[in-house]
Amino acid sequence: MSAAERFFVTGALGCIGAWTVRALVRDGMPVVAFDLGRDHRRLTQIMSEDELAGVDFVVGDITDLASLERTLDERGITNVIHLAALQVPFCRADPPLGALVNVVGTVNLFEAVKRRGGLPAPVVYTSSIGMFGAADEDPSTHRLEETADGHPTTHYGVYKRANEGNARVYALDDGIASVGLRPMTVYGVGRDQGMTSTPTTAIAAAVLGVSYRISFSGTTLFQYAEDVAATLIAASRSSLQGAHVFNLGGSSVDIPSWIAAIEDAVPDAAGTITAAPAELPFPSEIAHDALTAALGPVPVTPYRDGIAATVEILRRLQTEGRLVGIEQGLPAAEPSPA
């Protein structure tokens, strides 16, 4: 860690963005939070007012290259963590907008770094296991090997694969170092949208005492948002050169076990959480040894501990009168009949 570090986090108002900003602030780092939105609720759920006061908020659009260049220059940025993106459902609903934000926005970020003459740290960004399809798993091991070729089945996955390719070209042509991380099912307070958000929403439903149906079954690789943030920061502080992409590790958990862990943390929720039968269209077993080899040990919170920590935060919000179902991904309440 250097006292001269100044971090720039795009998509800072999203789930992973909020946890990344929190980790940096608690580490005493200057943080520029760059986001088109103005809703700070995910940050306020996990950070104190004093912590938030230390964040430099910039309302900006990653599709605006000039805005990115100007912010990097004016703030003297040394470290970039790029998280701004539209999730799977939004890319499906509006593919041109998804491409503009997820692909052009990422190219803009790399271009802004290039035009600034590079940075002392690699550009760190989130790719996704979504750039693979279920058929990409190895037929003998039945897991996604780190050498697998991606055949995405969503626009989102195609965009993420394109970002990895563009990062490689910026390294080849311009010497811009980068590290891409591929999360799978991120959970924790603030994870209230996206295809794999419903296991987190189920935790909020349990705390609120309402029934809820997780939108998929099967087994998936869960990653606690706090761990993802710590790994992103470790990647930013690495000395890796060239373009690297790593699968992110975590806890491989089947949905019945996930529900059982919620019920252990919130006993009153027993029998209220169910799951749809369909499984996710992605590999469930994912190799991820290369990440540890490159960065050293990275945190992996046991999923039961992650669920318990999430319940603790949600209960605090509930005590403070700040736990709102719709803000946790739950549907709006039906109006009472007249």
Image (spheres, helix red, strand yellow):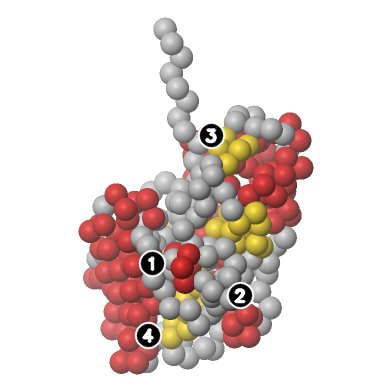
Whichever of labels 3 and 2 marks the residue nearer the N terminus, that label is: 2
Circle number at residue 324: 3
Name the kind of residue labelled 2 in the image. Thr
**Could you say which is closer to the camera, residue 205 or residue 111?**
205
Which label sits in the foreground, 3 or 1? 1
- For the residue carrying disc 3, how many other residues have a C-alpha within 10 Å: few (<14), some (14-19), or many (20+)? some
Residue 226 in view, yes or no: no
Residue 192 in view, yes or no: yes
Residue 299, by quadrant, is bottom right
Contact between labelled residues 1 and 3, with CB atoms less than 8 Å apart = no
Whichever of labels 2 and 1 marks the residue nearer the N terminus, that label is: 2
- For the residue carrying disc 2, how many other residues have a C-alpha within 10 Å: few (<14), some (14-19), or many (20+)? few
Whichever of labels 2 and 4 marks the residue nearer the N terminus, that label is: 2
The residue drawn where x is 54% and y is 75% is 138
Q: Secondary structure at mark 4?
A: helix
- For the residue carrying disc 1, how many other residues have a C-alpha within 10 Å: few (<14), some (14-19), or many (20+)? many
CA separation, marks 1 and 4? 19 Å
Circle number at residue 152: 1
- The correct choice, above or below, for 253 with respect to 71 in the image is above
CA separation, marks 2 and 4? 28 Å
Residue furthest front in the image: 140
CA separation, marks 3 and 2? 43 Å
Whichever of labels 3 and 4 marks the residue nearer the N terminus, that label is: 4
The residue drawn where x is 30% and y is 69% is 103
- According to the picture, the residue beneath numbered tag 4 turns out to be 168
Residue 228, by quadrant, is bottom right
CA separation, marks 3 and 1? 35 Å
Whichever of labels 3 and 1 marks the residue nearer the N terminus, that label is: 1
Contact between labelled residues 4 and 2, with CB atoms less than 8 Å apart = no
